[in-house]
Amino acid sequence: MIFGSSIVALVTPMINNEIDIERLRALVEFHIKQGTQAIVAAGTTGESGTLSDKEKQTVIYHVVEQANERIPVIAGTGSQSTEHTIELTTMAMQTGADGVLLMAPAYIKPTQEGLYQHYAHIAESVPLPQILYNVPSRTACDLLPETIGRLSTFANIIGVKEATGDLSRIQAIQKACSRKLALFSGDDASARDFMRQGGDGVISVTANITPHLIAMLCQSSLAHEEEKADALQTQLLPLHKALFLESNPIPVKWALHRLGLIQNSIRLPLTPCTETVQKTLEAAMKIADCFVGETL
């Protein structure tokens, strides 16, 4: 598979509301050492909605340079506008990204024909490998399997991140497509079952803090090592749930701060993690045995 199975949706470290380049580069090294197979930079978990285009390019540039071709880098370049998405995707290609993740346009609620034309224009305009991203809980539109099937005729559309949590989508997408697309779960809690039922991996929030366990979960799931995969799922499930008690990436950025990997900084309109969620999250982190540092 072009991007592997264990992919992290990387946070964007900040200090005094500015991108913390030193910590960003350190996170890339952390993931390479811990077995992550690819990195999504400047995606939703990376607070893309609050980053300027210049800041997105900065994040992508430093992740690409630090990765230094050791693992692929996928840039989050989706936006509400087709033309703007083409501009961002072109920028990502020129900055050295190996592929892009394209979230469906949010808020404006395009029709299925509008979604098809949106993605078709991007695929025709930029030759970079592209992963479609369906997350109706954030976008208020649903990229249906039949529309994905129509888009599967484009050679540079190589995968789908399916974040509905609806496992029936796997077979529906596979049936609709004219060729094999890589299917990635965008829902950590159901990723184990997603792979059990034919999915190819996960683009994970949880992997930010337990990359080695997510890599092991993917490996064991795809190798049909059911007992090992189920044990890992049991260990990780409280963490999966705790990381979404508040809007992503609020909890995961606090967890990384608790591990000593980033400063405790997040941009408005997102706010710092509440003490109640911190307590639940810390308990889940202990179950996952992921404490590696001291709080900054």
Image: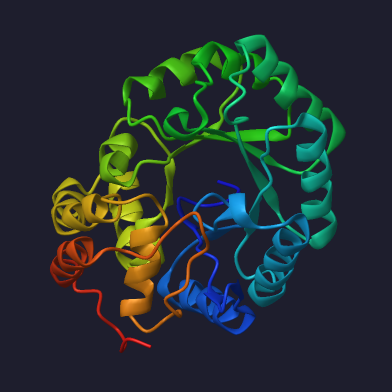
Q: Is residue 127 something one can see in this rendering?
A: yes
Q: Residue at x 75, y 61 (%)?
A: 57
> Of residues 58 and 233, which is closer to you in this image?
58
Image quadrant where residue 126 sits: top right
Q: Is residue 215 something one can see in this rendering?
A: no
Q: Is residue 45 above or below residue 275?
A: above
Q: Please give left or right for residue 257 compared with residue 156 in the image.
A: left
Q: Residue at x 26, y 52 (%)?
A: 240
Q: Residue at x 15, y 62 (%)?
A: 280
Residue 150 position within the rendered picture, expressed as x and y whole percent measured from the top left: 65, 14
> Of residues 225 and 183, which is closer to you in this image?
183
Q: How is the image coloured?
A: rainbow
Residue 159 position within the rendered picture, expressed as x and y whole percent measured from the top left: 58, 35
Residue 258 position within the rendered picture, expressed as x and y whole percent measured from the top left: 31, 78
Q: Residue at x 42, y 45 (%)?
A: 201
Q: Is residue 102 above or below residue 179?
A: below
Image quadrant where residue 50 sits: bottom right
Q: Please give left or right for residue 187 compared with residue 84 in the image.
A: left
Q: Is residue 227 above or below residue 175?
A: below
Q: Is residue 276 above or below residue 45?
A: below
Q: Please give left or right for residue 272 compared with residue 230 in the image.
A: right
Q: How many marks?
A: 0
What is the quadrant of the C terminus in the image? bottom left
Image quadrant where residue 254 sits: bottom left
